Each structure stands twice: as structure tokens, then as C-alpha cells.
Image (spheres, rainbow, N blue to C red):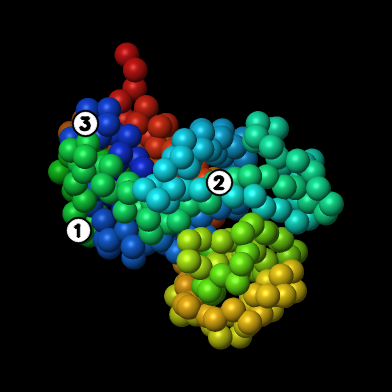
Amino acid sequence: MIVVGGGVAGLTTAVLLAESGRRVRVWAREPAEGTTSAVAGGLWWPYRIEPGPLAGAWALESLGVYEELAARPGETGVRLVEGVHDGVRPAELGAWAGRVPGLRAVAGGLAARLPVVDMPVHLAWLRRRLERAGGAVEVREVTDLAAVPATVVVNCTGLGARSLVPDPAVRPVRGQLVVVENPGVTSWFTSVDHSPGASTYFIPQPGRLLLGGTAEEDDWSLEPDPATAAAIVARCAAVRPEIAGARILAHRVGLRPARAAVRLERRSLPGGRALIHNYGHGGGGVTVAWGCARETRDLAFPAP
């Protein structure tokens, strides 16, 4: 079987399929380090992903996996880190929130110790785990899902599904980050601004601090905007003043694959073959990766 797409959704799905005894290959247009997943901040939280009840269930399943992986942070890239969601109230969240260990109300928002995933490390670990299970990753572009020579084809192409399926319901939501030397920040922080496209967050990663961010709908630009970067730094420094003097290491831009609802379903291909769609995760791809992978595996090989 072939999984199309080599981001976190594709690799996680391929791992579960390979570890269930299937012969799996991943066909990816670019290496994992070139995907949107590699740019992600990596904080576990169901953000800009629908439908809420399903996303919550997928997120909780993934949370359990990440909590186990956090025992080996150097290997898996997953750590458990304290932080605050400023301006978030429990009533705004779904039933899933009541099952997040340690999630609690604090002045102005919610606090918790949540998984933070160092995405370049985690993606490399997923690939190694896939290879240990007998799978392989090939850099190979797909232009027609029906032409993929496999009994089961899994579509994890994210924003690429817009043209590949084609599915015009998949739209980009542009996110810009600034990477700085960490001036000693050990906790994450998020605060969603209700003005269009703006938010404030910082996420500590090994050797660096990620500052964000934006959520610009239908913006395809991958070029960092200097004015946007300056505004991101200023917003973060308003929360933690030491960020203002931090040396900038890099600028990053990623396009979240937004959709009114995640598409996770089985379709038929000619010759009795199956196509499983698993895309449209918006800003929650890392958060729901393991839950969606498990459901994809069950759709591909339903129990008798």
C-alpha cells in the first residue's frame, strides 16, 4: 500500500499501517523537512480544526501517545512543558478538555503541562520508526491518485489535496514564525487576538524559542514579511520583555491546510481498490496525528 504525503499525518499513518504488518511505502513530493509539518510550532492543542467533537477524540488519543513519547525526548522530540492559554475559558472548549490531565483555570486563562513537539526531530524519528517496521519513504510526486499502483492508497497530502483530489474546500491559512535565541523562557504561552489573522504565542524548543504568529486565510505567500515579523516580536515582548533583545535565528512560513471539516473517509478506486482520505487538519495536524492515523488504519482494513 502507498501513503501519499510525507508530513506528520502521512508518516504517522504509515507507521501504524507498517506496524500492523502491512508493506507500506510513502510517496512524498518533498522530504519531511520541506513540509508544512516541519514549520509547525509543535504545541499539542486542537487549534483551527473541525469538527470539534471528532477532533477532540483524535486529539485525546494522540495526547496519550505523546505523553508516552515524552519519556524519551532526545529520541522522539516530544517533551511535556507547562504553559498558559491566555484568554481561554473552559466553557469555550469541548468535552475533550475535561479529560486533559492537569488542565486548570488560572488568572486570565487556562494552564496545563502539554506535549511540545520538536518537529524536525520528531519527523526524523517517525521515518526511522517506519523503516524499522519495513516501510520506506520515496521522494515522488503524484498527480493522479487513481493511477497510484496499490491496492490501498492513503491520501495525506494536506493542502496538496486542493489540486490533487481536487478539493477546492481545502484552503491555505498562512502562519508566520520568528525563531530567536531563547533568553531563558521555559514555558509556552498563547493568546489569540480577535483581530483578523493575529495571535501571540511563544514555544520553547531545544536551543531556540519560536515566536508567532499569524493566521492569514487564503494567503499563499511563503515569503516572510518583515513588518509582520517585527509585529510578532513586539507582541511576544509585551508578555516577556526579555524577548525584545533576543537574536533572531530564522524566519519561517507555513500554510495550514484548512477545511470546514477534516476529510477522513474511505472511497473506491477502479479495480476494487480503496482510497482513504486523511487531510484538512488545519492548525491541528500534530495534535490529531495519532488519532487520525488509527482511524485511517481501521478504514483501510476494517475488522471482519
Q: Percent from the top left, x then y, of residue 117?
A: 48, 52
Instruction: Please identify the quadrant where the C terminus is shown.
Output: top left
The residue positioned 32% from the left and 58% from the top of the image is 32
Residue 99 at least partly seen:
yes
Label 3 amino acid?
Arg
* Residue 80, numbered circle: 2
The residue positioned 68% from the left and 45% from the top of the image is 112
Q: Percent from the top left, x then y, of residue 91?
A: 79, 41
Q: Is residue 240 above or below residue 170?
A: below
The residues tagged by marks 2 and 3 sit, at their Cα atoms, a distance apart of 32 Å
Q: Nearer the observer, disc 2 or disc 3?
A: 2
The residue positioned 51% from the left and 68% from the top of the image is 208
* Residue 140, numbered circle: 1
Instruction: Please identify the quadrant where the N terminus is shown.
Output: top left
Q: What crowding class fits label 3: few (fewer than 14 Cα within 10 Å), some (14-19), or many (20 or more)?
A: some
Horizontal arrangement in the rendering, residue 22 relative to residue 55 (left or right):
left
The residue pinned by badge 3 equals 22
Query: Of residues 112 and 7, which is closer to you in this image?
Result: 112
Q: Which tag, 1 or 2, sits closer to the chain's start?
A: 2
Q: Which tag, 3 or 1, sits closer to the chain's start?
A: 3
Q: Residue furthest bottom?
A: 226
Q: Percent from the top left, x then y, of residue 119?
A: 42, 56
Residue 219 at least partly seen:
no
Label 2 amino acid?
Leu
